Image (cartoon, coloured by chain):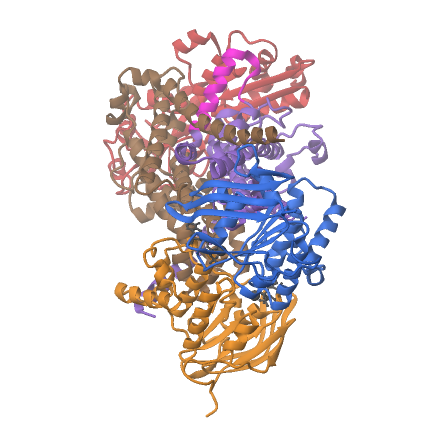
Chain colours: A brown, B purple, C orange, D blue, E red
Amino acid sequence: MGDRMVFREHLFRSAAVICGLLTLAIFCFLCVLGLPLLQDGHLLSLLSSPWAPARGLYGIFPMLLASILLALLSLALGFPVSLGCSLLITALAPRRLRMLLIGMIRLMAGIPTVVYSFAALFLLVPLMRTLIGRGSGLSLLTAAPVLALLIVPTMVIFFVAGFEKVNRAHLLALDALGGSRVQKIIHILLPGARPALINGTLLGFGRAMGDTMVSLMLAGNSTAVPSSLADSARTLPAHIALVMASDFDSMEFTSIFACGLLLYLVTGLLMLLMRLPGRSPDNES
Amino acid sequence: MTGQRKITEITVTWFCWLSGLLLLAALVILVGYLIRRGGPVLGLSLLFGDTPPLDALLLRKHVFDGLYPALAGTLLLIIGAMVLAIPLGIASGIYMAEYAGGRTKAVFSLLFDILAGIPSIVVGLAGLSITIFLHRIFGERIMPCLLISCLALAYLVLPYLIRTTQVALESIDPVVRRTAPALGASRLQNIGRVLLPHSLPAIIGGIILATGRCAEDTAVIMLTGAVASAGIPRSLLDQYEALPFYIYYISAQYTSPDELATGFGAALLLLLLCSALLVLALVLQRRLTIFLLYR
Amino acid sequence: MAPAVKIRVCDLNFHYRNRQVLHDVNLTIPSGSITAITGPSGSGKSTLLLALNRLWEEIDGCRVRGRVEIELDGRLQEIHSPALPARYVRRKVGLVFQQPNPLPMSIFRNIAFPLQLAGVRDRKLLAQQVETALRKVRLWQELHNRLEDDGRSLSGGQQQRLCIARALVLQPEVLLLDEPTSSLDPETGQAIEELLLNLKNEMTLIVVSHYQDQVQRIADLRFTVREGRFTRLPAGRPRSRTGPAL
Amino acid sequence: MAPAVKIRVCDLNFHYRNRQVLHDVNLTIPSGSITAITGPSGSGKSTLLLALNRLWEEIDGCRVRGRVEIELDGRLQEIHSPALPARYVRRKVGLVFQQPNPLPMSIFRNIAFPLQLAGVRDRKLLAQQVETALRKVRLWQELHNRLEDDGRSLSGGQQQRLCIARALVLQPEVLLLDEPTSSLDPETGQAIEELLLNLKNEMTLIVVSHYQDQVQRIADLRFTVREGRFTRLPAGRPRSRTGPAL
Amino acid sequence: QAADDLAPFTGLKGSLRIAGGTAHIPVMKEAARRIMSFNPDIRISIAGGGSGLGIRQAGEGLIDIGNAGRRPTDTEIAKYNLKLFQWAIDGVGVIVHPDNPVRTLTSAQLQGIFAGRISNWKEVGGVDREIDIYTRDESSGTRKVFWKKALARGTISDRANVVVSNGAMKTTVAGDPFGIGYISIGYMDATVAPVSLDGVAPDLANVRNGSYRVARGLYSLTRGEPAGLARAFVDFLFSPTGQQIVQDKGLIPVR
Ligand SMILES: Nc1ncnc2c1ncn2[C@@H]1O[C@H](COP(=O)(O)OP(=O)(O)OP(=O)(O)O)[C@@H](O)[C@H]1O
Ligand SMILES: Nc1ncnc2c1ncn2[C@@H]1O[C@H](COP(=O)(O)OP(=O)(O)OP(=O)(O)O)[C@@H](O)[C@H]1O
Ligand SMILES: [Mg+2]
Ligand SMILES: [Mg+2]
């Protein structure tokens, strides 16, 4: 029995190790396949030159910039809404409405990106064209709200789970001291659910950074460096999807592995940065 | 009550209600639009084309103009991916919450966050390249197929499962956590009989999230085996059709308004499928909780 | 002069889902008194306290029928009337739970917290109030150099006193205490008893207690519950620091 | 014949992070006795109990130095020795917490749980053991038709008795009780006292209590703690249902 | 007639994998449908992915038949030993929003617009509003042909919006009163307006008689000489029934 138990505990560790190794495996894989480009000393030009394969320039800086801008913008839109909605679900809404909202959120988590983007193509794009007053209506500003809509369910589910784990006795204590619902939110729920808030936001950000379809269909995909949020721009995942179909042995194709690598590194770096100010979100109790 | 605090109260309350309303409005607009465009085509013929439904269900005849193969493909995809991902994800989550500590935990934590940040298209790219690689080594039998897609999707949703499990376990009240050991439970028993059942709702929430992600992802399956027409897959090594890919394909390649309408019909169908899975998960959660805690 | 009525409960009924826990409770409690409630475990003592400051509203599946009137700010008011915010009632009618429930924050903030909730900002005032409250429950000596520790790292008895201090800091008009001395050693228990007697001048107290001798010592009024029905018992011989009972 | 030694504690020191809570504790407790531990709140009583069944290992940042030997299955064993699984120690040395902690499951399963942990499957046997345990703590009457309710929906006192029943069902050799009667009414408390006296024949009991009279009534041995240092007091006049104290 | 064309499939078994250019899919699907109805033992799977992917996957042997909307490069042909089959011709036409009064452009104007030199509709006789340019991604066969034959290998502005497919092009231009783009003639419908190039309207008749020059062949390709099922499938495409399907789907048959 003892052996079996030790065995099972090893199982847990192995599972984690496998998952961790998979992450590293992707990294190595991207490195190996992107190697030709890196070897040719294109690395720097990757970040400085424009994208013009016909002239042998494979720069992806505009895409990198657009990716980060878009992800941040959609997080800026999505985070407050997620927070508000999850608080509504846990603390403010009556029971019935709460169930309804949770159902709604969970349903939204399963709506394909394609559907969002497709509907937005007919509904949001003309609207944005009129609002912006120039250009096609395909822009970062158009993609951001749709992307926000996409990441909100993920975040809300995480946030709500976090809030619900907050000790009931603490909530009751605050009630007994004459606190209002809003005070309950500010003083008990938010601090109590901090790890869940951080984790949910990180996941949401990752999702926004990595989404292909929304930016592919709504952001316009022009390869120029966006000079404003109302400009058409191309994100890295969309770029990968667009270049994907070119010749296998071409430099273009190799460069998308460099894109993948860059995406990977940028997310990794951001995760590291988020850990710097405080301690790791996991060490919080 | 001071004025400033009153303002805070009102702002926070309004803010929360507005967010909820905003989401609700977005969903209603979206679903309403889908129904307006796709509702009329919804029906048996959307599913089975002109093949008799019974023959199609019993796999006696191919379905050509219907979404039945895509529906079946999506379901198989979800089941396959979840069967692979759930054990691995939950086990890793348990390891993170209950066993890992200090440096190890920090490293794994970072890795999983990065894992969550890997774009699906990169996962698809990796899946495709690895398949090509394997194909060169092992020859004809390895092709982009259902199995590869399931593997890639499972990989994609792992972080959701890991994180929900971990967060759920970590936020259990220390008193509850300490009770079973005091009664002579081993660590494993404590996890299996108290901690996990206790966090079941949260974990199911994660599973629902992951399922939704499997059901909707297009970028991965596009590169690893989903095709425009294949019929019902007979084995894991077959190619398959899938609803999200179909929607993408139609939106990209429709030639007539009728075809576009089937695209909207497919979107509605996918929505229905997701709702059905959701209800199933909730029923399962209730049953499971009762079974684990009250029997 | 007959003492003013502070609390009047008429035909109070209480249900948890479909189990009735309180049956037609009628009580009248005079101002500035200590009322003791005794009765077997599970008979509904804690439940009555929940009904007196509307805290039951926060628990799923409870229902209340009947009137509860409490004199707040000089007027006898029906506490469940929609015009009265629950928050106001709960600040005026403090409650110390049977099981100590310090909040997950520092000891200092635990006590300063209700004041902060009510809008007090001034750090100096807070610090002073915290010290006063801690001294009242005899915790100052033990804890004054651990004020930044987490409230939950205290021993059971320390936690309970912390919670009493937290309720006192708001200076409520009525204070409900659910077995306040159950996890205290006799000396500290004694000190708390003294405290309660002292407080009688400032507020009306209702104490749930199992200690017959304690009840005998401090209560002006005694009720006993059995399966949700209240009976008044003859009072003990209450002591009073300021003189004989009113 | 001198009574066999059941528990021997030598030079036990206990730290929470860098605060020392127990200082050089030395105790010897004979088999089949009731030992009472009294002392002011926060002095380290609960902490001692945690050290006696290795439960401290589940709490972050604790350190223990010293020897704790308990006679288990007929042999005096150092409980912290790596060869002994903590699980085994905890089954043999039961602990009832100061604050009742029913698990979030049905009343029935709460009590059957330790048995299930130990591998008992037989439903009939479980049902029978649960009934016996509930009868012992006088809960059967009140609860036998609510067995499927959540354990957390009970009143404070009911919860405490539930937890005692849960500890009894494993038939431990040593039972540690942290203020077992603190939230009980005198009658039920009395019943628990009787129960403890009865249990003396089957196991060794250590009871933390603030009730001096209770301690006087039941304890064979008395210790008092002050800031982590234990002193032995002269025993009271323990009663025993089966005859005079050994 | 149809039965004759399907006869070679009698007794054949197994599965056939097809992938690549998306313009081919409607024809492929219909052909597969006929064949599988005729002989249920045959399974044919059809995927998109783009011309480049079709060429590569066929070359790697991941699929049996690859589709491409352009001729593979000579290196590709040599490297993979590809066999080409051109079974249809497709034209690529310029489109604008139906409300746009501009219905005809010269080659020079078109090149100016796509290079970004002409940036306002009023310069070519339209309203006073900036031109929104839509183009396809670099690996698109449609783009290659358009770039080569309509733009004379001129530059395409990096401010141009890039859309991923014919359908997406149609949807966006149909929604943008100031947009201009190009799609495969087979995809044109009433939601967009075709623009004549140097006075020649982009329609099937003009492509067929050679007066509209922006056209391309649709290819299927195999690694080495096709055999068995793949052979039968390719032959079927060239049979009268196959060519009829091509015509039904809005493309121009080669026979
Ligand atoms: N988890 C913990 N972390 C830090 N300090 C702790 C922790 N638990 C208890 N302490 C401290 O250890 C000391 C002894 O605590 P213990 O719980 O043993 O007291 P006790 O004698 O049981 O008191 P009471 O009668 O009030 O329950 C107290 O000063 C307490 O604040
Ligand atoms: N949340 C709840 N849901 C359902 N029943 C409950 C709940 N809380 C208490 N009860 C039941 O209501 C009855 C009265 O409970 P209450 O807590 O008022 O008892 P009490 O007199 O305070 O007992 P004790 O002295 O043991 O604390 C008990 O039978 C209890 O089981
Ligand atoms: Mg109670
Ligand atoms: Mg204690």
Q: Residue furthest right?
A: D124
Main SS type for the magenta part?
helix
Residue furthest bottom in the image: C1
Can residue D154 be seen here? The reply is: no
Q: Is residue A252 visible?
A: yes
Instruction: Give whichever of A26, C198 is nearer the camera.
Output: C198
Numbered label tally = 0
Q: Residue at x 37, y 23 (%)?
A: A257
Please provide the residue range marked out in magenta: B122-144
Q: Position of residue A3 (x, y in %)?
A: 60, 28
Determine which quarter of the picture holds residue E160. Answer: top left
**Residue C244: percent from the left, percent from the top?**
46, 85
Quadrant for ligand 2 reads: bottom right
Q: Which residue lies most toward the front here?
A: D1
Q: Is residue B54 magenta?
A: no
Q: Nearer the viewer, residue D42 or B37?
A: D42
Classify residue B277 by image quadrant.
top right
On the image, the x and y values in percent for residue D95 come to 57, 50
Q: Where residue E21 appears, x then y in whole percent?
A: 47, 22
Magenta segment: does it hold B129? Answer: yes
